C-alpha cells in the first residue's frame, strides 16, 4: 500500500542526499561511465540523475518501482546491509512513495526509450520517447505528500551541500566514472573519469590545491592504505574535505580520522582540519559495515592495527617532503 511504502521510505529516504545516494548507486550498478546529477533547490524541488548505463527494458521499467523488485545479485559485502536494512530492491519504491518520479530508460538494443511517471503511488501509462541509451530518473517535490518529513528539511544550502558531498564521495571512489554535479544554474564540479583520484580532487577543490596534495601508500599483510593528504597548511576548519573509503565504500570512522591527525604529529595549523581522500582495502571479514545506512559508520575487528597503519602512512608521506 501507499502508506506501507511511505513508512518504509522513511528508512531509505530521509533527505535529498539519501535519494541521490541511492540513485547514483543504481547508476554505478548499471555500469554507467557517465553520471550527471542535477539539483534544484538543494534537491528538494528536483533531483535528476542521468546515466549511460545498461538501461531497462519496458517490463523492467514498470517493475522497477515495485518493492523488492531487484534484478541484482549482491556480493558478500552487501549481505549485512541487506539483512539489517531490508534495503534490497527498496530504493525506487521508497522514493516513488514520497516524491513524483519520472523514469526514462533505454537499453542499447532498443530503438526508443520507455518513460513512466509515478505520482501519489499511481503509475501513468508507459510512453515511448526519444532518448539516448541509459537511464534518467527525475525526482520532483520530495516529501510533497509527507509534510512531517518536509518540515525536517534544513535550508536549501545545507541540503545541497549534503547531496553534493554524496556525489563527491561517489566520484572519489569511482575515478574511472565521469561525474557531473550541477544545479539548475551552474556546474558545481565535473570529473573526467580517467581513473586518477588526484584529477578527481582537482575537479572538486581546484587544480592548485590538488597539486599540493601528497600521495600516501602503506601496505601490511592485512591492509592497503592509499590516497592523498593535504600538507599541514592546507585544509579548512571543517571536515568537509575528509574522505575515507573502506573497500571502495565511503564511510566515516572517528578513530581513523584521529589517526590521520595523529599522523600529522602536531604539524597541522591550529584550527585546521586536513584534506584527505584515503582508501583502505582489507579483508571484508575484518570490517563490520552494518551500523547505519546514512551515517555509513563501520567497525573494525582490529581497530588499533588499522589506525596505526593509517597514522604511519600519513607520517611517512609528510616526512618524505618536510625533511
Ligand atoms: P536495488 O538497487 O536494490 O536492486 P532499487 O529499488 O534501487 O533496488 O532498483 C530497482 C531495480 O531497478 C534495480 O534492480 C535495477 O534493475 C533497476 N534500476 C534502477 N536504477 C537503474 C539504472 N540507473 N539503470 C538500470 N537499471 C536500474
Ligand atoms: Mg538500488
Image: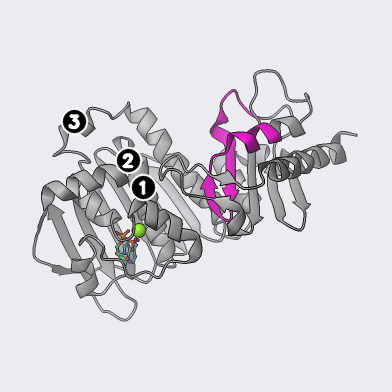
Q: Look at the numbered disc 1 and say if its residue's Cβ is closer than 8 Å to ligand 2.
A: no
CA neighbours of label 3 inside 10 A, class few (<14), some (14 to 19), many (20+):
few
The magenta stretch is 235-259
Name the residue rendered at 37%, 72% in the picture: 54
Disc number placed over residue 148 in the picture, else none = 3
Q: Secondary structure at mark 3?
A: helix
Where residue 322 sits: x, y (%)? 86, 34
Callouts 3 and 2 close, C-beta under 8 Å: no
Residue under label 1 = 20
CA neighbours of label 1 inside 10 A, class few (<14), some (14 to 19), many (20+):
many
Name the residue rendered at 12%, 46% in the picture: 3
Q: Look at the numbered disc 2 and say if its residue's Cβ is closer than 8 Å to ligand 1.
A: no
Against 175, is 234 above or below? above
Q: Is residue 78 left or right of residue 85?
A: right
Q: In whole angstroms, how far apart are the C-alphas of marks 1 and 2?
A: 6 Å
Against 110, is 194 above or below? above
Residue pushed farthest top? 270
Residue 126 visible in the picture: yes
Amino acid at each position: 500500500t501507499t502508506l506501507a511504502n511511505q513508512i518504509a521510505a522513511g528508512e531509505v529516504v530521509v533527505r535529498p542526499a539519501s535519494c541521490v545516494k541511492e540513485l547514483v548507486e543504481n547508476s554505478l550498478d548499471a555500469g554507467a561511465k557517465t553520471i550527471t546529477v542535477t539539483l534544484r533547490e538543494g534537491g528538494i524541488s528536483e533531483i535528476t540523475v542521468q546515466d549511460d548505463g545498461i538501461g531497462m527494458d519496458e517490463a523492467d521499467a514498470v517493475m522497477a518501482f515495485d518493492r523488492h523488485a531487484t534484478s541484482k545479485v549482491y556480493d558478500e559485502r552487501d549481505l549485512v546491509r541487506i539483512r539489517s536494512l531490508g534495503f534490497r530492491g527498496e530504493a525506487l519504491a521508497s522514493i516513488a512513495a514520497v516524491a513524483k518520479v519520472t523514469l526514462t530508460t533505454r537499453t542499447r538494443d532498443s530503438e526508443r526509450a520507455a518513460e513512466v511517471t509515478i505520482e501519489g503511488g499511481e503509475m501513468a501509462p508507459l510512453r515511448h520517447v526519444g532518448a539516448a541509451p541509459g537511464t534518467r530518473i527525475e525526482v520532483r517535490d520530495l516529501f510533497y505528500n509527507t509534510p512531517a518529513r518536509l518540515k525536517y528539511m534544513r535550508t536549501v544550502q545545507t541540503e545541497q551541500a549534503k547531496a553534493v558531498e554524496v556525489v563527491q564521495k561517489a566520484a572519489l571512489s569511482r575515478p574511472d566514472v565521469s561525474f557531473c554535479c550541477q544545479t539548475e544554474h551552474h556546474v558545481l564540479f565535473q570529473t573526467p573519469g580517467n581513473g586518477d583520484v588526484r584529477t578527481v580532487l582537482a575537479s572538486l577543490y581546484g587544480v592548485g590545491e590538488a597539486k599540493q596534495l601528497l600521495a600516501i601508500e602503506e601496505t601490511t599483510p592485512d591492509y592497503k592504505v592509499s590516497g592523498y593528504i593535504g600538507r599541514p597548511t592546507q585544509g579548512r576548519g571543517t571536515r568537509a574535505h575528509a574522505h575515507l573509503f573502506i573497500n571502495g565504500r565511503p564511510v566515516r570512522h572517528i578513530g581513523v580520522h584521529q589517526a590521520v591527525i595523529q599522523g600529522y604529529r602536531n604539524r597541522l595549523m591550529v584550527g585546521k582540519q586536513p584534506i584527505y581522500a584515503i582508501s583502505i582495502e582489507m579483508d571484508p571479514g575484518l570490517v563490520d559495515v552494518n551500523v547505519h545506512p546514512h551515517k555509513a559508520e563501520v567497525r573494525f575487528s582490529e581497530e588499533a592495527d588499522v589506525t596505526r597503519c593509517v597514522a604511519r602512512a600519513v607520517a611517512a608521506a609528510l616526512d618524505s617532503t618536510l625533511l
